[in-house]
Amino acid sequence: MSNFTRRGALGLAGGAAVLPMLGTPALANTKLTVGALRFTSHAASFVAFERGYFADEGLDVEFKFFQAAQPMAVAIASGDADYAVTAISGGLVSLAEKGAAKVIGGALSEEKGIDGQLILASNAAYEAGLTSPAALGGKSFAVTQAGSSFHYMGSKIAGAEGVEVSFKPLQKVGAIIGALKSGQVDAWSIVPHIAKALAGGGAVQVIGSVADYIPDYQVTTVFTSAANAANERAQTEAFLRAFSRGADDFNAALVDKTAGDEAAEEMVKLIHKYVYTDREYAKAAPSIRNGAMRINKDAALNMGSVNDQLSWFKSEGLIKDTITTEMLVDPSYAQMI
C-alpha cells in the first residue's frame, strides 16, 4: 500500500501555496496516518492536506491508501492508521464491539437532488434482461466482502424489489470492475465518479439509483481507535476541524457550485492528484466532477441511517444482536442528525 507524505506532496507541487499558520498550534508537528481510498468521496481529507488545514492544526499527516473498507478498519484497530473515512462494515462494527474503534462523525451522504451512487449491470446481463433492479432476481451482485457497504446496498435493493440475489465477494474494487466488464458478475452499486465513467465508456449499463432504495444513506463515516476517541480529544477535534474545512471547500466547489468556475477547476485538479492518477487530467476531470456527492458539514452523523445499518447487520447475522449504537459511535465529537 502506498504512502504519501505532506512534505512529498509539496515537493511534487513545486511549492504550492499553503495557508499560513494561524498562530502556534497546540499540537505542533503531531504525526498522524490517515486511511483513505482513492475515491472522490474522500476528497475532504485530500483538500485538508493540500490546503494546509491539517498543518494549521499542527498535524503532520501521511496518507495510507486501501482498496476496501474492512482492511482500513483493521488498520485503525491495530494502530497502523490513526483516523480514516469509510463505510460502516461488519468488520468495523465488530471491532467497535471489542472496544477497538469508534465512529466520530459522518462524511459522504446520499441527498435528494444530487447524483449519488448508481446501480450497474454488466452489458451481458443487461442484454439478457437486467434493465432495472426489479430484474435482479437470481442474478449475482458484486461485493468486496460480506458485511461491506456493497453487501448492505445490494441486500436493501433486492429486499425492496422482493427478489433474491447471490453475493459474490471479490475483495477489491478493481477486481469487481474487471468482473463486471467481463460479465463474470451481473450487478454492482458504486459512487458516481466510478459508475458514470464505466457507463460512459460503454463498459456497463446504469439501471438505477441507490437513493431510490436507501434515501439519506450515511454512506461513509469518520472513525478512529477507541483509544484516540477517549484519550486524544484535542488531537481528534483538530483532525475533525481540518477535515470539515476540507469538506466545506469541496461542497462549495463541486456540490453546491457556489464558489465559481475557477474554484471548481482548482478543486478537480487537486483531487486528480489522488483519484484517477493513471489518467491524463482531461480524461479524469469529467469523472471527478460527476462524482461529487455531499460530504456532511461539520462531520454531522445521520443516526437514523446508522441505526438502519446496524439493524441490517444483525438481521443478516453479521454482527451480534447485543451490539448497540453506543458501542459503535462516540456522540461527543459531531452533531447527531
Image (tube, grey):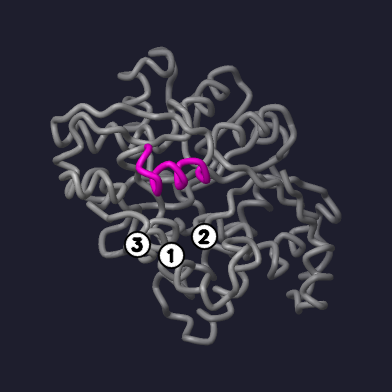
Q: Residue at x 30, y 19 (%)?
A: 315
Residue wearing tag 3: 202
Q: Residues within 10 Å of mark 2 (few under 14, many from 20)?
A: many
Residue wearing tag 1: 292
Q: Secondary structure at mark 3?
A: loop
Question: In whole angstroms, how far apart are the C-alphas of marks 2 and 1?
Answer: 7 Å
Q: Amino acid at mark 3?
A: Gly
Q: Amino acid at mark 1?
A: Ala
Q: Secondary structure at mark 2?
A: helix
Against 107, residue 255 (above or below) is: below
Dot 3 or dot 2, earlier in sequence: 2
Residue wearing tag 2: 40
Residues rendered magenta in the picture: 173-184
Q: Nearer the viewer, residue 47 or 157?
A: 157
Q: Amino acid at mark 2?
A: Thr
Residue 63 placement, left or right of 114: right
Q: Residue at x 45, y 42 (%)?
A: 176
Q: Residue at x 32, y 26 (%)?
A: 312
